[in-house]
Amino acid sequence: MSLEISRAYVDAILQQSRDEYPDECCGVILGPAGSGKAVRHKPMVNAAHSPTFYEFDPKDLLALYREVDDNDEEIVVIYHSHTETEAFPSRTDISYAGEPGAHYVLCSTRKEIAPATEFRSFRIIDGVVTEEPVTILD
Amino acid sequence: MSIEVRIPTILRPYTKDQKSVEANGATLSAVIADLDANYAGLGERLLENGALRRFINVYINDEDVRFLGGLDAQIKDGDSITILPAVAGG
């Protein structure tokens, strides 16, 4: 398994992580149902407005799933940023991960690495994290 | 009285992969008990120590049940319940 994603989306997500710093940013990339293709980027509001937590607002969450259903789409990528730590799923990320079919993408704005360049993808299924390669399409 | 309950992907193993199932009950609590009677184990995925789990969102029609009285929320015939996993983390 791997994630294929266009460079424009990677750049947009990294930019969002810088814009919303010191809070975590979050969002999804959608695609046609069953395709696994990440083709429609939808930034979401971090209702927690926190440097250590993110959460889609419950109303936004319902609207998102309705939209996905109405458009015959699926959630291909769920992403968020870590502000000061590695772009690797935290214990909290693992305990909340509720979409076994999604790529969980993390980026990081931590300063000890060149800021906002880390961009990694994982599957999180039944509490097990598996990193997967990311192919960036130009 | 019959209520449509929409089931998220992660809980479909309990409903034989059905996206939506029928349930009965005058309150959310009764609906969850009815679901658990027909789809063993589903109740435990929704409740913890008698309360809704923090990372599960439940809606009656368009409204988050947290604003409708939680497990005591009243359900009417024709209502639609949607269960969604929170998208959240640290």
Image (cartoon, rainbow, N blue to C red):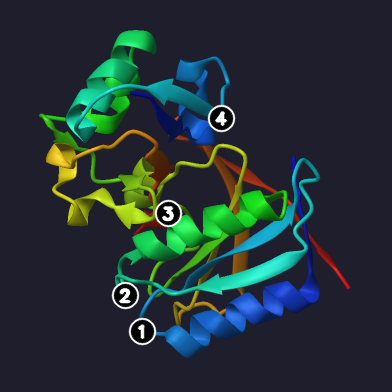
Residue depicted at x 66% and y 62% = A29
Q: According to the image, label 3 marks what residue? A: B87
- Mark 4, Cα crowd under 10 Å, few <14 / some 14-19 / many 20+, is few
Q: Quadrant of residue A79?
A: bottom right
Q: Quadrant of residue A22?
A: bottom left
Q: Secondary structure at mark 2?
A: loop
Mark yes or no: residue B57 visible: yes
Report the mark closest to the observer, 4 or 1: 4
Q: Amino acid at mark 1?
A: Pro
Instruction: Give the CA separation, mark 2 to mark 3.
Output: 16 Å
Residue depicted at x 59% and y 85% = A15
Q: Quadrant of residue B25?
A: top left
Residue under disc 1 on the same chain as residue under disc 3:
no
Q: According to the image, label 4 marks what residue? A: B19
> What label does residue A51 carry, if any?
2
- Labels 4 and 3: the sequence-earlier one: 4
